Amino acid sequence: MAIQPSKLTIALLAVAILCIAGWIMDLIVGVAYDSENVSGIFSGLWHAAAKHSYCALVSLVTLDFQGFLENITQYADIVGGTFKDHYIYCIVFAVIKLAVISIAGGAICRIAALQFARGEKPGLTEALRFSTKKFTSLFAAPLAPIGIIVFIGLFILILGLIGNVPRVGELLMGIFMPLALIAGALIAVVLIGTVAGFNLMFPAVGYDNSDCFDAISRSFSYVYARPWRMGFYTVLAAIYGAICYMFVRLFAFLFLIAARQILALGVWTESNNGQVGKLAAIWPKPVFRDLLIRPNWNALNWSESAAAFLIYLLLLVVIGLLVAFIISFYFSANTIIYSLMRNKVDNTALDDVCTYPEEDQGEPAAPEPESEETEPQQESEEQSQPERETKPDASSSEQ
């Protein structure tokens, strides 16, 4: 399901839009990321995500859960530090990312729902049309719990401000402390439900055509009703997804190596600087861990730079397809998990998916205009009908 062309196309477009937006923001801000000579905040986060995600997936394949958690924690620390230093940049990019993922993720979930429930494969435009219609629900579903947490936290904050008042403040804070503890418990419930049920919000919209609050309610109820089952499905999907990704990455590595090695048989000349071969300067040999190695742009002349740039763009598309596969697998797997959880908790059939009326019935047929010739015929039939009914009575009386 994850390698379906329509899903990969949608995910690849989402990756391309996010990359273009990040690179434009890097040009506007013009801040170097770290000491690794990476220019731009987005570029730095991209390299950090590529490094730690690869190590995390390898840890999942080898069932090294400690290594998996360490890589996730390290990347979370990098993101947290970046947000602390450039919070405006991160907030703007997070909004852009959520908007793009809402459309792309909603479309992929819709395709996965119809494919898993009915065996149908809706087209690219049909899926994007659905996610566009439900954009408000998809965009607001992850944000609504955050708003609820902030709203509840304001009461605790107000109580803390009251505590600054001499004598009376301390007394009021002690009296209303049980309410503050209840508010803290509600925040914990919403926070756990949001983190654990976030994977089910988009599938709820794709499967049941839910609105924002219905998607939140369903995801929360499924998580708290069957937490162990939800955890088992999630871990199983993550391990299986990591194995599938390694196969896809191996396929990409093999066809890149095959193309480069055969190409190297024909290119025997040296590069402009004479230090390495021309092909090695234009296209450095990829390795399994790093499929995209940047050439030394300063050592190339204009023609070699142009060739290297074109090859680099093609390699970016290959890397984008790998990322698109991860996105497609994530939403497809969580759509299936949502269907299984809904079947277990609500006893809803797996093939029960909500569709629009126009998807099932099509466009309503236009009523045929009544012709004037049919009206006399209908009147004559209506007049002859009682005569036909009276004929048997007459014959019976004569008999």
Image (tube, rainbow, N blue to C red):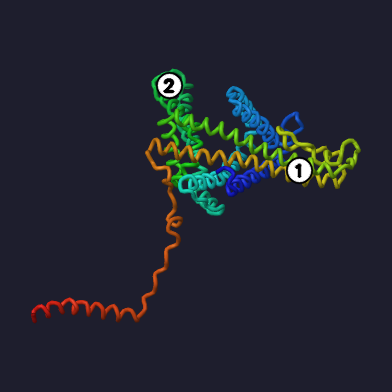
- Residue that badge 1 annotates: 259
Task: Name the residue rendered at 61%, 48% in the picture.
Answer: 9
Give the x, y percent position of residue 103.
55, 47
Cα distance in 3D space between marks 2 and 1: 71 Å
In the rendered image, the quadrant that contains the C terminus is bottom left
Residue highlighted by disc 2: 173
Q: Which of the 4 image quadrants contains residue 258? A: top right
Estimate the x, y position of residue 278 in percent, counting from the top left: 86, 41
Mark closest to the chain's N terminus, 2 or 1: 2
- Inspect the image, locate mark 2, and give the three-letter code of the amino acid beneath it: Met
From the image, state whether disc 2 or disc 1 is nearer to you.
Answer: 1
Residue 173: in sight, yes or no? yes
Please state the total of marks drawn on the protein image: 2
Residue 85 sits in quarter: top right
Is 372 on the left-hand or right-hand side of 3?
left
Q: Position of residue 93 (x, y in %)?
A: 62, 40
User: Disc 2, disc 1: CB below 8 Å?
Assistant: no
Q: Secondary structure at mark 1?
A: helix
Vertical placement of residue 361 versus 171, above or below: below
Image-based side of 181 in relation to 104, left or right: left
- Callout 1, which amino acid? Ala
- Residue at the extreme front of the image, as rendered: 399
Q: Is residue 58 left or right of residue 394?
A: right
Q: Is residue 59 above or below residue 205?
A: above
